[in-house]
Amino acid sequence: MTISAAVPDSASGERGGGRPHVPGVLAAVSINATGEAVARMQESSGAMPWFPGGQTDPWDHVESAMALSATGFLAEAEAAYEWSRRTQREDGSWPIRTDVGVVTVPGIDSNFCAYIAVGVWHHFLITGDGAFLQRMWPTVWSAINLVCRFQRNDGAFRWGADHVTYAMFDEALVTGNASIYQALDCAVRIADEIGAPEPDWEAALAALGLAFREQPEVFEPPSDHSMDWYYPMLGGAIRGREGQERIAQRWDEFVVDGLGIRCVDHRPWVTGAETSELALALEALGDTEAAIALIASIGHLRDPDGSYWTGLVYDDGKRWPVEKSCWTSAAVVLAADAISRATPGNGIFRDVRRF
């Protein structure tokens, strides 16, 4: 597909303005190249697959669209959101997995469906386009109302359901719930912006926040995956001193100096997306220096075309899987924007509210 030119910006690259960059690590032109690499992976339908010819899921699709918005590829971002609007099912959900337009995993993931609110709010923050917000409002409304059906009496959200029988899977996963927390906050903001407040969403958000802060036992125990470690801080449910202490508790289990962070605590495998998301969590907690160091540490995953390889098995020096994933590049872009505070959407993770 034809890629539009990024929005021009002549800013000097100093902190506080201009285009996304990582001071001392990646110049704005480098981050723009990463945005362009993301744009090149977009299918003609607007879908953002994991890699060309690969699968598309509704969460990573939105994350990739957010990177397009942050790097000025606005037409491509809006094509991605149009894909979400057009492919949403009547119940407000999207299939867990689609391969080049063919549904291959039809089930419902509550977190996957909720994330559309984050992307839509982020794009509105960057563009100020009220018509876009109005156009996407029915999509967000349907998705969030569906997701709220997954909330249990203890405030946590069930992770998914079968799309044929609607039988729900009762487990409440830490990572998914933390992401839903951010999504609900964005959904509430969208509703307020268009003058259609949704008090039930606010109540759902408050109950979920209370569960994270006062009843963590309602969630499945944290796994050996790094996402269960940092996501409560990334999603905004846990911040401040408690968030800093939680990061410190498992730092040595996951962080490999100079290489990034492990995806799984006992495997010699560092991944770019998780490293970038941890950088976003640290920036939201006020530790920008550590966030910059993390992005610098995954320079070995950067391809000359600006894209990023998914990960590295560091005990044998081999990239695995052998793919440059769209969402890995997108996570780097979003971290750069947060660190440099460049676009009006740079606080999408930092500014999550506590109810």
Image (cartoon, rainbow, N blue to C red):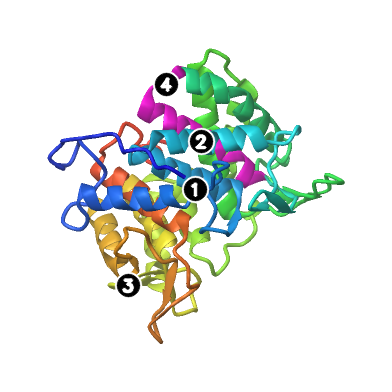
Q: Earlier in the sequence, mark 1 or mark 4?
A: 1
Q: Amino acid at mark 1?
A: Gln
- Which secondary structure class fits the magenta region best? helix
Q: Are marks 1 and 2 in contact (CB under 8 Å)?
A: yes
Give the residue displayed 39% in from the left and 28% down from the top: 125
Please, which residue is most extreme toward the front here? 2
Asked if residue 62 lies left or right of residue 270, the reply is: right
Give the secondary structure at mark 4.
loop
Mark 2 and mark 4: Cα distance apart in space? 15 Å
Q: Are marks 2 and 4 in contact (CB under 8 Å)?
A: no
Q: Amino acid at mark 2?
A: Ala
Q: Picture quarter containing residue 230?
A: bottom left
Q: Residues within 10 Å of mark 3 (few under 14, many from 20)?
A: many
- Is residue 165 on the magenta stretch? no
What is the span of residues highlighted in magenta in the rendered image? 110-130
Residue topped by disc 2: 79
Is 88 on the left-hand or right-hand side of 72?
Answer: right
